[in-house]
Amino acid sequence: MRITEIGEFGLIDRIKEALGPPGAGVVVGIGDDVAVLRARPDRYLLATCDIQVEGIHFLKEAISPYQLGRKAAAINISDIAAMGGLPTYLLVSLALPKETTVEYVDSLYEGIITEAAGVQIVGGNMSHAPQIMIDIFLLGEVEPDHLLLRSGARPGDKVLVTGSLGRSGAGLALLLDPTVDRSGEEAKEVLEAHLTPTPRLKEGRAIARTRMATSIIDVSDGTVSDIAHICEASGVGVRLWADTLPISPATRAVAEALGQEPLEWALHAGEDYELIFTAPADKAEKLAALVKDETATPVTIIGEIVEEGMSLVLPSGESLPLEPRGWDHFRRR
Amino acid sequence: MRITEIGEFGLIDRIKEALGPPGAGVVVGIGDDVAVLRARPDRYLLATCDIQVEGIHFLKEAISPYQLGRKAAAINISDIAAMGGLPTYLLVSLALPKETTVEYVDSLYEGIITEAAGVQIVGGNMSHAPQIMIDIFLLGEVEPDHLLLRSGARPGDKVLVTGSLGRSGAGLALLLDPTVDRSGEEAKEVLEAHLTPTPRLKEGRAIARTRMATSIIDVSDGTVSDIAHICEASGVGVRLWADTLPISPATRAVAEALGQEPLEWALHAGEDYELIFTAPADKAEKLAALVKDETATPVTIIGEIVEEGMSLVLPSGESLPLEPRGWDHFRRR
């Protein structure tokens, strides 16, 4: 049987089963973006890794080494942010074709160092390979009572999101269509969102400190796919309100220029690295205001948790079923 | 400038410089195989990663997925062993072509799980890629007074090694020459040494507990290259005695069948994952005996630390200069 028949998440389930139940030191094991480990009484140890492969995650001619270094670090920091944690130590596993220049590697590391300010880069390894691969292993820590998981959403909870959705999808669409002018401010905003996303680290900490959130995830695979992870882990469903999804004017302008639908990007394109989280209905607005006050990042309520099923409510009142169709590395498309 | 001009280690030096001095929590940072981090008062946290790339580190047709899983885990466990530590948690970053079968992944994980008995497999990520890549991130721990480093060798110290050298080189030579018969016991021994090396975990712990060793490393790049890492970190030189190098009868038999020189493999082929360590002259024999008693693994004294330079003393008394020419991923060969 080919892995394309069961997909990335089917494969993870299979591995989970082969591994059996996690041991005593493991708070969160395989299947989540981040492992949560009992390290010392007052702190959980967090461990995560995420790879960028040339030709799969990026095209060498479309992203500078500095941007690639930043992005590779950012996507890992985002995973720690989505646990309410703080990143501490970073290891870089780098595979490079032999014709790579020293200057390319210098810029790549400059990007990692810039993005991972405050994080110690303590090791890794180097190898050669037919294409560039950068696999970052990031450790972090979180106070046990600040830890945020995917699994606590309850029916009636509101769904909140930081910043805006769909910008990274707009940036990718621009990159893939070289005929479109990219010189304007709007193009710049969405390209930057795609090439050097900002992990919502201080927002994750702020959310964790309030202890009001019931679940959280970062938008990497796609808004719907990532909310589906929350729904699965929490045993609930979700209803999103289409007209509340925060889509920036730049994203809308780029969508218009390309003749595409910005809502599609917001729901499915992923890689926005915003935080999606849930909170009881009576606390949601206060939580949104607290996070915005502390971080200056807007927070929007975009839906509510229901007993089961995933749907999108249109402004007309019509309700459409939502299917996760974001990133799965092995599914046939 | 191409990375081939400065090589893997030149590149690491450059990154080290860009990073600046390590922070307070870092006991050993970039440049070593393992990062050593202050985690809690009674334990250092160890973190390492090592990748296996299809076509670079292995050929898919020459190693089974089970063996590949075992080897990918073993080479990381070996790095923790060479610190005197114990492995604790493991993350797997896996990149696979889409035509990979589920059974292949099952066997790969069976290999990892088998080799990493006692270690918790807690996460990772999956991606697709043009070829198979398995990057393992391994955490471990060590008591601060048991930590072994590369940097403590002093002139007059003896050089010791566990097990035997050159077996993995013999195994690789057999794999690369399909015309040679591989059915005999000797072929089996060296192929196994190459395909599923045994990390010297209990030996590393036994060495650490004696607190007699002054430095240590595992043989991955090549005996001479790895001793060169000790010499560089300790600011010393080494003299190895050719006739003391432990080369197994199987390795000698395979060398004869292939018309090759087993001493060459023992010195330069690498991937034996034995531990090479140093101890003051008056403690070396006692240390060797203690480790052998506790682990049943033979330990041989193969040379001595000198003020500077690296040389090999032949049985004739003649002395040859030794040059590290083991594995450097980017050096032109």
Image: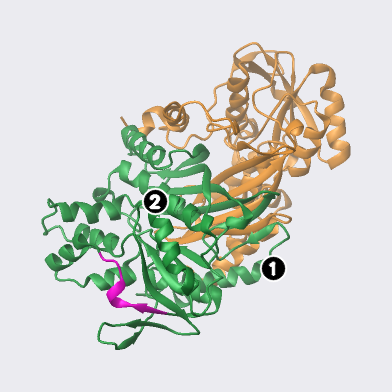
Chain colours: A green, B orange
* Left or right side of A17 for B243: right
> Which chain is indicated by disc 1?
A
Q: CA distance from mark 1 to mark 2?
A: 39 Å
Q: Residue furthest top?
A: B307
**Type of amino acid at the residue the image marks with label 2:** Thr
Residue shown at 55% from the left, 47% from the top: A139
Above or below, comparing residue B207 to residue B104 in the picture: above
Q: From this viewpoint, is residue A330 visible? A: no
Residue shown at 14% from the left, 71% from the top: A259
The residue carrying pointer 2 sits among few (fewer than 14), some (14 to 19) or many (20 or more) residues within 10 Å by Cα, namely some
Q: Position of residue B211 (x, y in %)?
A: 80, 28
Q: From this viewpoint, is residue B297 visible? A: yes
Quarter of the figure with residue B154: top right
Quarter of the figure with residue B310: top right
Say if the magenta span includes residue A244.
Answer: yes
Say if the magenta span includes residue A174.
Answer: no
Q: Nearer the viewer, residue A209 or B56?
A: A209
The residue carrying pointer 1 sits among few (fewer than 14), some (14 to 19) or many (20 or more) residues within 10 Å by Cα, namely few
> Which chain is indicated by disc 2?
A
SS for callout 1: loop
Above or below, comparing residue A149 to residue B164 in the picture: below
In this rendering, do the residues under marks 1 and 2 share a single chain? yes
Range of residues picked out in magenta: A239-247
* Left or right side of A242 for A205: right
